[in-house]
Image (tube, rainbow, N blue to C red):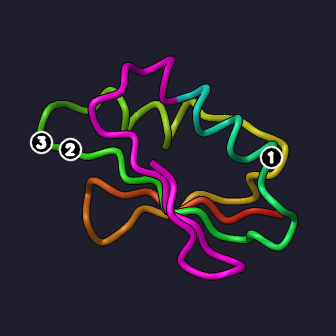
Amino acid sequence: MTRFISAQKAEIDVHNMHKEEARRYIERFLTRANGSVKEVTVIHGCTSGTVLRDMVRKGLRHPRIKNKVVGLNDGVTILILT
């Protein structure tokens, strides 16, 4: 599920997705997102394991990702975009 918080911020929830399904979903969003979107909060959860968290924080690559910020909640990673 994707929710736009403002013209520059979006939120993506990938709970309950398999690793590759979540990767494709996030990559597709980043490719299609308007250039004005500069920050994407990815909600991957943390209670049912670390597979999604590790994929987002360590394995996810995309040309628009400038930086990754660990949220105060361990189930969230913030992507800073170019």
Q: Amino acid at mark 1?
A: Arg
| In front: label 2 or label 1 | 1
Q: Please state the extent of the stretch shown in magenta in the rendering.
A: 1-22
Most extreme residue toward the left is 47
Image mark for residue 47 = 3
Q: Secondary structure at mark 2?
A: loop
Q: Position of residue 81 (x, y in %)?
A: 75, 62
Q: Position of residue 63 (x, y in %)?
A: 84, 43
**Looking at the picture, does residue 16 appear above or below residue 66?**
above
Q: CA distance from mark 2 to mark 1?
A: 27 Å
* Marked residue nearer the N-terminal end (2 or 1): 1
Q: Secondary structure at mark 1?
A: helix
Q: Which residue is mark 2?
A: 46
**Looking at the picture, does residue 51 appear above or below residue 67?**
above
Q: CA distance from mark 1 to mark 3?
A: 30 Å
Q: Which residue is mark 1?
A: 32
| In front: label 1 or label 3 | 1
Proximity of marks 3 and 2: CB atoms separated by less than 8 Å? yes
